[in-house]
Image: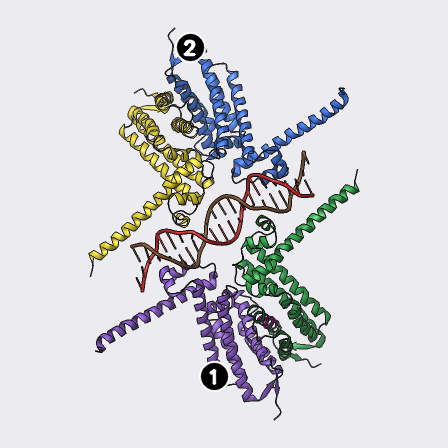
Chain colours: A yellow, B blue, C purple, D green, E red, F brown
DNA sequence: TATGAATGAGAGTTCATTCAT
DNA sequence: CATGAATGAACTCTCATTCAT
């Protein structure tokens, strides 16, 4: 006979286990993040990460295949968060230039400033480490490109213009990503004092809107 | 008493020595470049570089303090070459938008394509390795910024416009560097097939000219 | 007051428990056997054995003190089986050379061929692992020696001969064990194609009978 | 101009280097031998071997690819020595039964007794460690088999007999190797007090001569 | 009894750097 | 100047064993 109680008990226990496992997984990622970002990936020893996460080295290897794997998971998570964030901003403004403006502002205000470690890992510590890491970096940028490209095409449909050449959309997207990446890098990695995010934001948006406009031609209907 | 003869003999010998030393120094840098760019900085062993340069490991350490030092010198040389190249292009066209166009074209055609290893080291392998390396990277970018900024200001004087805000010039320069860096990265490091340098070049220039224009306001004289 | 009922109930339950325990114990040994024999003792992980036996790691440690202990119990069981088998063959033929022939045949046909894993563990995987394991290996061989020695002495009584020297019996026994061990090793561990058990068997028996004869001298009555 | 002196100096220096290298190689093998034989292969740590050889761990890895490689080289050397030794004994006595006698005696007196560590490694510590090690063990035994087989065939030619069956020669050789191996194992690994090499030697030879005779039939000329 | 996640000592291995020659 | 063998600290990773549940 089916016993809901013992079943629920089991289920509860299993649920708790699962919750704990996911928590620990996150704990490790959270511990690795500042270490990778501040000491550098190679300068960070597995033991430090384990200590910082209050987890044994063995447990760390239970959750992640190796150090590279840990970096990759961290990277993927950062990429996911960033896309989620930017996606929401594009949603807010419908398919318009406004969306690009909001997304640009959010990139600084909701990503770089509150999560500098995440940005440093994405733009600095994960660069040139290994082929596998680079593949994941590429994947993240490809998805971001796809997202921004989607927003661009939706805007095109709305506003009725055409691109100067077949590469224009690609160029616009890559340029946007490049501009923001470089500003973030100078600000976060080099802590360049000439980069004042508050002041720079508006000009950056103006610049890229100007860039976009120059590659989009009003269609005569 | 001054002995021109022995002096000259010494001088000749010293000159030869110096020439040889500089040659060897270059040989080592040249050997390290493709290894760092293709295998990666960490995956490249000192012994491998020495072998490739046909120099003993000990000699390598005579010319360079350590592995990091080698990377830094390589990086500095790459930065110098790039600045030299871009500077020449700006010279050619006087202080005009044309100069930006030429410099952009030259970046791809005279730097990325003929010297992919140099570009990969500048944009990938030297990233996030250590504070000292990062300082030199920053220095290189600062100088590039200064160069481009100079060209921009000369153009401003010539054409008589003013920037929308005090940050505009900074934003323009950083944006330009960011755009080109990202395109180079996708093309060289990820070998992204959607990046066709030939086709992209013109649009990139159009984009950034649009961007520049949008931050520069014609002055009413 | 003695309560047969509850007693019987307890007894039955206890019996079942004991049966289950022994079953599980065997299951674990049976799971470890092919793993040790095919992957090797050191290459086999405790977790793998537990999985294969469908038992938790904790349970495995309930039944066996540690990995070495598991190997020792396996080894002892293998030794017991082998002695049982050879003993039965000696019984069949009474105290005669025939018994040695039958035992030799049985060693191949009833041990090595149907239970190659057991033979591999006895002759290869348990060798040189630790002092404790080696003690048990020695014990097994000592008992086998004693068995064969017993058969030899019974044959001596029956047939009335004397050994050439006081060591002769020892030498005969050790030689027999050595010959069969080496053949089994070549056949099972190295899978030496020049070892054809079918064809070799008869010659091996002839060889050792010749050996035995040469160390036994007919007594003049 | 050719300078014999500096040349000789170079040559001498190079010779010394080579000598030192070979010496060091031997020193490491010599240091590993007693450790492997007495503590066991797995219980012996690389660091111990390096310490014992008064060599740094790094140097050890310069001479040997890894721990397994060290064991294999040790094993090969032991195998080579043993064959050399037995070969010389067979040579001494021409192609006769005497040769088998001498070789048997030499196995104990010139191998097992003076070099117990070598014998233990050959017969115990190298057993069941890995496929690669096992391949080398097999190779050694194959060569030993070939050597003994050669002696047997030469004796056959001299004495004019034929083997009972096509497998007889194989059986004789494998039996001889098995008998001596087992005696050595009991004596050296188990230090079995019932094995008195002095007394056992003669009987072992008698046994195997009897075995050989029983598989060889006088040819009627 | 039964579980299997957690532990952590300890292993092998690498390689930038040094220094006797 | 030149060599390259030698160093050994530092690193990642494994897995037998334990113990809270």
Give the number of the disc on residue B160: 2
Q: Is residue A201 left or right of residue B78?
A: left
Residue furthest to the bottom in view is: C221
Principal secondary structure, stretch drawn in magenta: helix
Q: Quadrant of residue B172?
A: top left
Give the number of the disc on residue C92: 1
Observer-nearest residue: A149 or D63?
Answer: D63
Co-location on one chain, circles 1 and 2: no
Residue C138 belongs to the span the image colors magenta: no
Q: Quadrant of residue B45?
A: top right
SS class, disc 1: helix
Q: Which residues are magenta?
A: D176-184
Q: CA distance from mark 1 to mark 2?
A: 118 Å
The spot of residue D34 in percent (x, y) is: 59, 61
Q: Quadrant of residue E1?
A: bottom left
The N terminus of chain B, quarter of image: top right
Residue furthest to the top in view is: B221
D2 over C154 or under it: above or below: above
């Amino acid at each position: 006979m089916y016993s809901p109680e013992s079943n629920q008990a089991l289920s509860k226990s299993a649920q708790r286990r699962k919750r704990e496992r996911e928590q620990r997984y996150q704990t490790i990622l959270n511990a690795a993040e500042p270490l990778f970002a501040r000491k550098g990936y190679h300068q960070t020893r597995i033991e430090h990460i384990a200590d910082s996460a209050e987890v044994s080295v063995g447990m760390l290897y239970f959750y992640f295949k190796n150090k590279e794997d840990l970096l990759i998971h961290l990277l993927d998570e950062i990429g996911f968060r960033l896309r989620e964030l930017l996606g929401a901003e594009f949603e807010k403004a419908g398919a318009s230039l406004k969306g690009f403006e909001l997304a640009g502002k959010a990139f600084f205000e909701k990503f770089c400033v509150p999560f500098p470690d995440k940005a440093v890992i994405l733009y600095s510590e994960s660069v040139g480490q290994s082929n596998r890491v680079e593949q994941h970096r590429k994947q993240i940028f490809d998805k971001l490109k796809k997202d921004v490209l989607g927003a661009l095409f939706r805007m095109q449909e709305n506003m009725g213009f055409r691109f100067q050449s077949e590469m224009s959309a690609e160029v616009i997207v890559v340029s946007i990503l490049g501009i923001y990446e470089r500003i973030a890098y100078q600000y976060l990695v080099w802590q360049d004092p000439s980069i004042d995010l508050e002041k720079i934001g508006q000009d950056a948006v103006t610049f890229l809107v100007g860039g976009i406009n120059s590659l989009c031609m009003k269609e005569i209907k």
